[in-house]
Each structure stands twice: as C-alpha cells, then as structure tokens.
C-alpha cells in the first residue's frame, strides 16, 4: 500500500496493544524508514487492542482514509484530514451498517472492495470465529446490514482469527479470496502455541 502517495509501496499494520496503527515509509529497493505511529488518543471507553488497518479512499476525496478493526469486532473510520502525500488522520469513528453500529465477532479485519461489481465500495470483515461478513455499499459511505460470504451453499468459516486479501489469483477476471487463519499448535515444540494456514477460494462467474 502506498500510504503517502509518493509512488513507492509502504508497509502498514495494526498492533496487539494498545492498538495503534503504525507504518513504515517505503524508500525503494526493498528499504523502509523507521516506524511511524498515528497520533491518536482513545477515550476511556474505547478498546483498540488487536487493531487491523486497511487504507482506501472511503469518502471519494482522492485521499486515503484508514479503516481500522479491533478486538471487540467493530470497524472504525479514520478520515484523512491532510493531503494524499501528507496524510493526517482524525479520531476513529465507528462505522454504521443497516442503521446501527457495525459489529462482527471479536478481532475484526476490514477490507474495502467492490465485491458485487456494482462500482460501489463494499466492505468484507473477517473475525475471530473464522467467518467472513459482506456489508454491501449503498454509496456515500453507507452500508447495508451484514450477510455471510458463502462458499457453495454454506457460509465461509475456517479455523479462527482469519485475515483476508481479495485478488484475481488465477487471472480469469473474477475476484478470489486468500484467507489466512490461526489454530492451536499440537506439535512437539513446547514454546510454540499457534500455527496458521493460508486458504485459496477461487471465485466463480454468476
């Protein structure tokens, strides 16, 4: 993701605690600058732990806003109050869906994408239970209530703590899903608690 619009890819990520968003400016040739942290202050009622982040022009301003998930399953919008090349992010505001606060099971991970091909941004949100929820974009930053992403006749559900990436893996013009997961480790290493897998779901034309 090119966070600051300089044509060079950067790295951005959330963190376990206290749940800020950090990024590393790309310098080219696989080199990165020091860690930068969003300057934010949470009120005492907010729990930002286990944050995840997805950068997207959510408001159609030509600047990248930040969509941020958290341990409680909410998704927040950090509006870019600066410019494309010098971003400055405002306070986190919870997104609404279907007329109420958007929420999934714990540890939400948002991905903004035109999932249904109607040229309006939608939202996919993975969670701690291994489910993936689709929130249809209605335009103007509004979202419909969530529905499960289906695999065949059943809702997608694998392992736990899923992280999702949308791509065209086999270059057939149809959106595919790469899904990472987390499961308890059952091997012989006593220091190892978890392991993960990556699943590929190939999309099908209607």
Image (tube, rainbow, N blue to C red):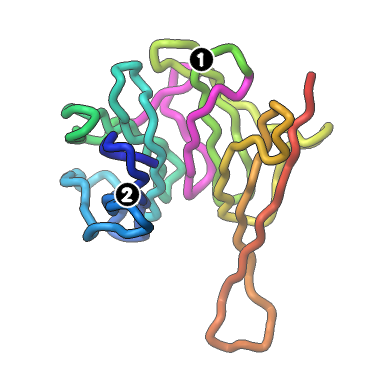
Percent across and percent down for residue 61 are: 29, 17
Q: Callout 2: few (<14), some (14-19), or many (20+) C-alpha neighbours within 10 Å?
A: many
Q: Residue at x 59, y 28 (%)?
A: 134
| Residue that label 1 marks | 120
Q: Residue at x 49, y 48 (%)?
A: 106
Please identify the quarter of the rendering in which residue 57 is found.
top left
In the image, the segment drawn in magenta is 94-116
Rendered position, 75 above or below 157: above
Report the residue that reaches farthest toward the front: 29
Which sits earlier in the primary sequence, circle 2 or circle 1? Answer: 2
Quadrant of the drawing holding the C terminus: top right
Residue 206 included in the magenta stretch of the image: no
Task: Say which element carries label 1.
Answer: loop
Task: Say which element carries label 2.
Answer: loop
| Residue that label 2 marks | 48
Residue 98 included in the magenta stretch of the image: yes
Quadrant of the drawing holding the N terminus: top left
Q: Callout 1: few (<14), some (14-19), or many (20+) C-alpha neighbours within 10 Å?
A: some
Rendered position, 165 above or below 153: below
- Left-right relation of 41 to 160: left
Q: How many marks?
A: 2
Percent across and percent down for residue 107 are: 47, 49
């Amino acid at each position: 993701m090119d966070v600051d619009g300089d044509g060079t890819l950067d790295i951005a990520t959330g963190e376990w605690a206290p749940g800020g968003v950090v990024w590393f400016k790309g310098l080219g040739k696989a080199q990165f600058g020091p860690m930068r942290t969003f300057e934010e202050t949470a009120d005492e009622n907010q729990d930002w732990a286990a944050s995840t982040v997805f950068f997207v022009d959510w408001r159609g301003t030509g600047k990248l806003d930040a969509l941020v998930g958290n341990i409680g399953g909410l998704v927040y919008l950090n509006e870019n109050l600066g410019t494309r090349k010098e971003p400055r992010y405002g306070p986190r505001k919870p997104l609404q869906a279907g007329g109420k606060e958007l929420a999934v099971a714990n540890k939400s991970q948002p991905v903004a994408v035109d999932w249904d091909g109607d040229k309006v941004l939608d939202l996919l949100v993975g969670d701690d239970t291994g489910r993936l929820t689709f929130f249809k974009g209605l335009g103007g930053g509004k979202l419909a209530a969530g529905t499960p992403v289906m695999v065949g006749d059943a809702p997608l559900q694998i392992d736990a703590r899923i992280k999702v990436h949308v791509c065209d893996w086999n270059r057939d013009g149809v959106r595919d899903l790469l899904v990472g997961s987390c499961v308890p480790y059952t091997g012989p290493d006593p220091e190892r608690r978890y392991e993960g897998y990556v699943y590929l779901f190939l999309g099908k034309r209607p």
